[in-house]
Image (cartoon, rainbow, N blue to C red):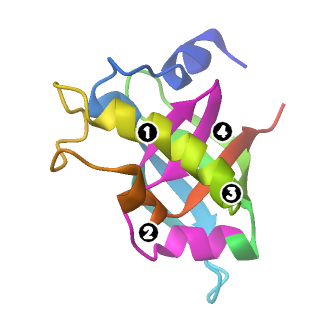
Amino acid sequence: MDEAVRRALAITPASPARDRTIDITTIGAKTGKARRIEIWFYRADGKIYLSGLPSRPSWYANILTNPRLTFHLKHGVRADLPATAIPITDDRERRRIFTHFVADLNQPHNPGRIAQPTSVEDWMAGSRLAEITFDD
């Protein structure tokens, strides 16, 4: 992986919202057509994840049908990275990962500009979660 791409993926709690914002292209679960959306990515324990506040996002339905996606970096470096999304459904694992996200989002500079405090329970109540693995 290119060093500039590696740096762009290495977000930290100090990273602003802009650095966390990407696009993904998935294949529609019902239509079979490419669907591109803007989304945040998260990092916990050196791994990359996609998630969001509780909702029923179409991107998640799409990856359940076809886990292949393109992860589009667009700030600082532009890159289209082929990847696979692995849904995380185990509650213990979800709680562990969401704990990282919530600690990051509840910091004083509030990178997400979300209502604070957010809680792990809020995220557990309906947020979807997927680990992203990039092709070699």
**Residue under the point 43% across and 39% down:** 101
Q: Is 11 situated above or below 63? A: above
> At which x and y percent is residue 98?
49, 46
Q: Amino acid at mark 4?
A: Leu
Query: Label 1: which residue?
Result: 101
In contact (CB < 8 Å): disc 2 and disc 1: no
Q: Nearer the viewer, mark 1 or mark 4?
A: 1
Mark 4 or 3 closer to N-term?
4
Q: Is 88 rendered above or below residue 74?
A: below
**SS for callout 2:** loop
Q: Where does label 2 land, which residue? A: 125
**Which stretch did the figure color magenta?**
40-63
Quadrant where the C terminus sits is top right
Give how far apart the Cα atoms at labels 1 and 4 are.
Answer: 23 Å
Q: Are marks 4 and 3 in contact (CB under 8 Å)?
A: no
Look at mark 4 in the image and give the residue it sits on. Answer: 81
Q: Is residue 73 visible?
A: no
Q: Residues within 10 Å of mark 4 (few under 14, many from 20)?
A: some
Q: Point out which mark residue 88 bears.
A: 3
- Relative to 134, residue 7 above or below: above
